[in-house]
Image: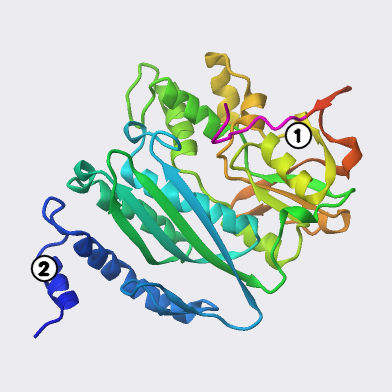
Amino acid sequence: MKDEEEQTNDRLNESSSANPTVRSEFDLIAQIRRRTSARASAASSLQPSSLVRGIGDDAAVIKQLSGRDTVITSDLLVEDIDFHRDSTRPNLLGHKALAISLSDIAAMGARPLWALLSIGIPQEIWTSDFIDEFYEGFLALARQYDVTLVGGDVSRTVDKIVIDSIVMGESASGGEIFRSGARPGDEIFVTGNLGGSAAGLRLLEQGARIEKAITDENEWHLIQELLLRHLCPEPRVGWGLVLGQENLASAMIDISDGLSSDLNHLCRESEVGALVDSTQIPVEPLVSELCGRRALDPLILALNGGEDFELLFTVSPENAARLPTRVDGVSISKIGQINKAAEGVLIAEGSRVWNLEPRGWEHFKG
C-alpha cells in the first residue's frame, strides 16, 4: 500500500505540472519538494552545514558545525504596499522576494544557504499559473547563489497577496558585520549605482510596464532597464562575502530604504557622524539620461529612492587599500568619511554643506 506522499507523487508524475484548477496545497508542496530535494542533497555535500531534513516535516533541521554562526533574516511583501500585481510579473516577484532577503544576508558579510518561503494568495490566483511562475523566479535566483529552499507555508487570503521570505546563512563565529562598527576616520563606500530602482518605480506609477511598446525605440530600452532595476534587483552577495571573509568592512547595511535613511541608520547604531560628497555618489547613468525628459532630480532619487539593494559600508583607512576594485563585475565608490557624532550626518556639494536628513521609505509615514 502506497503512503499519501507516494500517491501524491504518482499524480504529479502523470503530467509535467499539476493542473492549477484542481490541485491542493499538498500537491503544490509535493511538487516543490520534488524540485528542491535533489538540489538539497547536492548542497549538503558542498556547504559547511548539512541539511538533516527539509520540506516534508513540521520544521527543517540543519546540522550546525562548531565555529560557525547562523545568520537569519525575514522580509514581508504585501500587495498594494510593497508591490502591485498589475505592474510586475509572477516570476519577477518571486525573484524579488528572495533577492531582498539575500541582500540582508550579504549586508552581514555572511553566505546565504537556506530559504523558507510562505505565501498567502486569493482563490483566483491559486487557480491560475501565477504560483508556478512565482516559484520559478524564486528558485532560479536560489540556484544562482546555491541557496536551498527547505520549507515554508501556503495559505489563502481574502484579496491580497502576502509573501514572507526567510533566508538563513552562515559566517565564521564573530565574523559578522554589524551596523554598529563604524569609527571616526573610516571611509564610506557603496557598491554599484543608485537611483535606478526609484526611477523604475516612478515609471511604473506613470503607467510604464515591462515590454509595453512606446513610439521612441531608444527610450523603450532605457525604460525597460529601469523597470527591471526596481522589479528584478540583483543582491550583492559576492561583495558581502568578500567584505566579511576578508574582514574588510567595519560596518555595513544594505540600501533598502534609501541612502539618506540607511546612512543615518548606520551612524545612529555606531554613534558617529558622517560627511558625504554629493559629487561622488554613483548615480545610475540611465537615471541621469531619463531625468532630463521627466523633470526628475537624479541626486534626489539616489539619496532617497530606496530599494537599490546596494551595500553601504565603512572601511578603516588601513583596510581601504585592500579593497578589490570589482566583485562579480560590480564596482564600488568612495562617497565620504565617518566623523564624530557631534558633527552630525552631513552632505556637501562644493562649499555648501547641509544636514542629510533621512527621507527614504517608511511603511507608516503619515
- Give the residue type at disc 1: Gln
Q: Main secondary structure of the magenta part?
A: loop
Q: Which residues are magenta?
A: 356-366
- Please say whether residue 349 is visible from this viewpoint: no
Residue at 9% of width from left, 67% of height from top?
14
Gap between marks 2 and 1, in whole Å? 58 Å
Q: Position of residue 105 (x, y in %)?
A: 58, 59
Relative to 263, does residue 34 appear above or below in the rendering? below
Q: Which residue is mark 1?
A: 280
Mark linked to residue 365: none
* Labels 2 & 1 near each other (Cβ < 8 A): no
Residue 140 lies left or right of residue 288; in this view the side is left
Residue at 40% of width from left, 33% of height from top?
80
Residue 238's quadrant in the figure? bottom right
Quadrant holding the C terminus: top right
- Give the residue type at disc 2: Arg
**Magenta segment: does it hold 365?**
yes
Provide the secondary structure element on which disc 2 rests: helix
Residue 147 lies left or right of residue 8; in this view the side is right
Quadrant holding the N terminus: bottom left
Query: In the image, which is nearer the foreground, mark 2 or mark 1?
Result: 2
Residue at 67% of width from left, 62% of height from top?
242
Q: Position of residue 63 (x, y in %)?
A: 50, 81
Residue 151 lies left or right of residue 257; in this view the side is left
Provide the secondary structure element on which disc 1 rests: helix
Q: Position of residue 354 (x, y in %)?
A: 82, 25
Which mark is first along the chain, 1 or 2?
2
- Please say whether residue 50 is visible from this viewpoint: yes
Q: Give 178 or 111, whichever is nearer the viewer.
A: 178
Q: Which residue is mark 2?
A: 11
Residue at 78% of width from left, 44% of height from top?
267
